[in-house]
Structure formats: C-alpha cells, structure tokens
Amino acid sequence: DQQVKQNSPSLSVQEGRISILNCDYTNSMFDYFLWYKKYPAEGPTFLISISSIKDKNEDGRFTVFLNKSAKHLSLHIVPSQPGDSAVYFCAALNSGGYQKVTFGTGTKLQVIP
Amino acid sequence: DTGVSQNPRHKITKRGQNVTFRCDPISEHNRLYWYRQTLGQGPEFLTYFQNEAQLEKSRLLSDRFSAERPKGSFSTLEIQRTEQGDSAMYLCASRLWDSPTNEKLFFGSGTQLSVL
C-alpha cells in the first residue's frame, strides 16, 4: 500500500533549466509534506517542507507547491545545478497522529552540465 | 553538533546469524526513528522512540527484530536469525519533538547489511 507515490524514477535536466519533481499521495489524513535529498552512501537530508494550510513554500532555488484537492505536490528547482544531482524523496505525515513519516520511492535527478 | 551516528557502516553476515546495529542521535533529540531502505525504494518506517519509550512498530518489524533505547539516548536494532531478505540499508533518524510541525528528521549515513 504505497501511500506516497513518485511515478518518475528518473529525470534529466540541463544545467540552468527548471527541474520539476512530482509526488502524489492517497492518505487524506496527511497534512504535512517534506522533500529530502539523498546522495549515494549518505542518509537523506531535509530540503524543504510545506503544511497543508499553504499551497506554496519557497526557499532559495527550491519551491514546493501543494494541490490538496488533487493530492499532489511538486518540487521546483530553479536554476538547476550539477550539484543537485541526487535522489529526491517526497514524504508525508499526519501531524496530529503518531507522526510517522511515510516516504515515496524517490526520483533520481541528473543535472547535465 | 556531530549529527546522527550509525555503526557499523557495513555489515556482512551469514544467513542465520544475529546482528546488532547502533545509532547515536543528536544529543538533545528526544525522538529516534529506524527506517529500512532497499534498492529502488524509499525509506520504510520500522519503529520509533520518544525518549526510552517505543511508541510505534511497523508490521515490517517481525519477531526477529527488536529495538531498544534504554536510557533515551542511543538505540540498538537487533536482527536475529538473519535472512537474505533482511539485506538492506538500515537508517536511523532523530528529531527534537517540540512541535507537531517541526518535522525535520536528521538521518545518519545508515548501516548497509548484506546477508549471504
């Protein structure tokens, strides 16, 4: 039962262009969403988050958009840099519940110089 | 701040052997989580602690798995009678639970288990 889905296992983008990573969720109890980045042989590192009371959160080159009615969120990276090449995980939780963070399967982003 | 530390980084064992992993969280963090990640998948929740209390266990955590956090600081995850299907990266994460919306988990580098 995959409650958080990332349907694109990989994405290639030219340096300087926009990267858009997508995520869908099925559990309507989720009200807080996070993106993590993971390099090989390292643990995931927190990137950006958004509460369900917002539809957009921005942090530098990274912006997360949330569409609650569609149960969809996306991460935009502008401009993309070669150092952004990593696996990106979408994650979600119910902040009023046990707050177990549920992760998607990840999207491997390659930024081509 | 030394971050979340996990030991060992790699463990190779034979099927049927027992293994134990250790996680040292960031010192002031009161919540500690264990996740498992296999190739091509995202981290899967196993269990978590609030201080020394184990608050939730996933159905993935069979009877062969046990986790402890005896003094509310470091934690151990033991797998008894390992099976080849246990081969995975075991990730530990911690956070300071002071707000329902302070959800930033800090992960360690993981322990890569290979069961032969």
Image (spheres, helix red, strand yellow):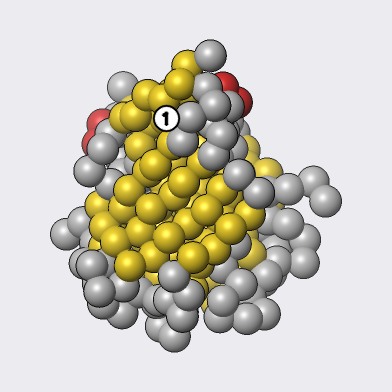
- Left or right? Give the position of B42 relative to B53: left
Looking at the rendering, which quadrant does residue B45 occupy? bottom left
Residue located at (48% from left, 52% from top): A35
- A94 with respect to A4 (left or right): right
Please state which amino acid type lies under the numbered disc 1: Leu
- Return the residue found at the far top: A113
Vertical comparison of A37 with B28: above or below: above
Q: Position of residue B6 (x, y in %)?
A: 62, 42
Label 1 crowd (10 A; few <14 / some 14-19 / many >=20): many
Name which quarter of the figure residue B28 lies in: bottom right
Q: Which of these two is toward me, B89 or A42?
A: A42
Residue that carries the numbered disc 1 in the rendered image: A109
Q: Relative to B28, is A66 on the left or the right?
A: left
Who's the residue at 54% across and 26% down the image? A16
Q: Nearer the viewer, residue B18 or A33?
A: A33
Q: Which element carries disc 1, helix, strand or loop?
A: strand
**Residue located farthest toward the left when viewing the structure as drawn:** A1
Pointer 1 indicates a residue of which chain? Answer: A
Q: Is residue A57 visible to us here?
A: yes
